[in-house]
Image (cartoon, coloured by chain):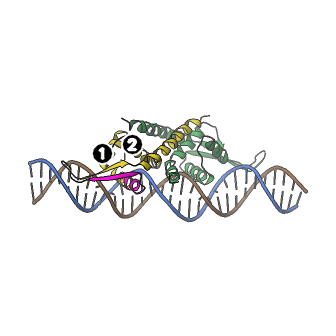
Chain colours: A green, B yellow, C blue, D brown
DNA sequence: GCAAGATACCTTGTATAACAAGGCATCTTC
DNA sequence: GAAGATGCCTTGTTATACAAGGTATCTTGC
C-alpha cells in the first residue's frame, strides 16, 4: 500500500518527540523497554529506528546514558534519561506539536 | 536553532495530509491560493515545498488538474481538485493521524 | 561444560520529503 | 516598452525512518 510510505514520512520527527515525552515521564529506561512502551502506545517502531535515534539524542546531549553492567540477571543494559537540555527542547517541541494539531482544525475555517 | 531541523522532519507527510484536507473542503484551488490558505492555518511552507508536492499528488492520481488559461485578468492558473482516490486516501490518513494524536496521550499511561 | 536460545545493543544502506534558491512565462500599469 | 506583480516549476541538499543483518552477554538443559 502506498500509504505505508506516507506513514513512514509522517513519523519523521514524531518518533523523536514521542521518545522524549516518554522519557520525561520516567526516571530512566533502557532500549528495549522504551521500544515496548512506545509499541504499547501504538507507536510501532523497530530496533533499526530506535537505536540510531537514541544515539543521535545522546550525541546532541538531549539524553544522558548509564550502563548497568551487573544485572541481577540478564544482559547488561544501557539506561537513558532525559537531560535538562532535553527537557527544554521537549517543551519547544510540544508547542510546535500543539500548533500542528491546531492547524489541522484551522483548515476548516 | 537545532529545532528547525526537527521541525522540517516532523512536517514530512503532515504537509501532504494538510493539503488533501484543504482540497476536500473546496471545490478547486490553484497553487498560490493553496499556499496562502495553508499559511493562514499556520502551516508555513514555500513554493519549493508546494509545487513538487502537488506534482507528486497529481502523478499518483490523488489530485486532478485543470488549466485556466484565459483569466478575466492576470496570469493563467492551474487548478487542483481532489479525486475519488484522493478522498479514499485522505480517509485512511485521517485515521492514522488520529492514531498519532492518541498515542501522544497514551504515553502517559 | 557446552549448545541453544533469549536478551540486548548496534551498524549499514536505501528511499524520500521538506526546503532554499533560482528561473521562466504571462499579464498589468505607467 | 520597462518594471513589477502574479503564477508555476526545477535543482540540489540534508536528514530521518526503516529493513536487514550483526555482535555480545547471560541462562537453561543436558
Q: Which mark is residue B93?
A: none
Provide the residue designation for mark 1: B33
* Residue count near mark 2 (Cα–Cα under 10 Å), binned few <14, some 14–19, many ≥20: some
Q: Quadrant of residue C21?
A: bottom left
Q: Residue at x 30, y 52 (%)?
A: B66
| Residue B76 picture location, percent across and down | 23, 53
Q: Which residues are magenta?
A: B53-67
The chain under label 2 reads B
- Element carrying mark 2: helix
* Residue C12 appears left or right of B97: right
Magenta residue check for B55: yes
| Residue B60 picture location, percent across and down | 43, 56
Q: Quadrant of the C terminus of chain A?
A: top left
* Residue A38 appears left or right of B81: right
Provide the residue designation for mark 2: B24
The chain under label 1 reads B
Amino acid at each position: 500500500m502506498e500509504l505505508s510510505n506516507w506513514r513512514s514520512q509522517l513519523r519523521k520527527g514524531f518518533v523523536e518527540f514521542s521518545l522524549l515525552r516518554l522519557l520525561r515521564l520516567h526516571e530512566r529506561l533502557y532500549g528495549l523497554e522504551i521500544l515496548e512502551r512506545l509499541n504499547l502506545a501504538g507507536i510501532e517502531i523497530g530496533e533499526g529506528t530506535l537505536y540510531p535515534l537514541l544515539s543521535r539524542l545522546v550525541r546532541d546531549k538531549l539524553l544522558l546514558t548509564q550502563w548497568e553492567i551487573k544485572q541481577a540477571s540478564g544482559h547488561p543494559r544501557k539506561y537513558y534519561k532525559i537531560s535538562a537540555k532535553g527537557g527544554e527542547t521537549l517543551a519547544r517541541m510540544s508547542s510546535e506539536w500543539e500548533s500542528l494539531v491546531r492547524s489541522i482544525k484551522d483548515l476548516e475555517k
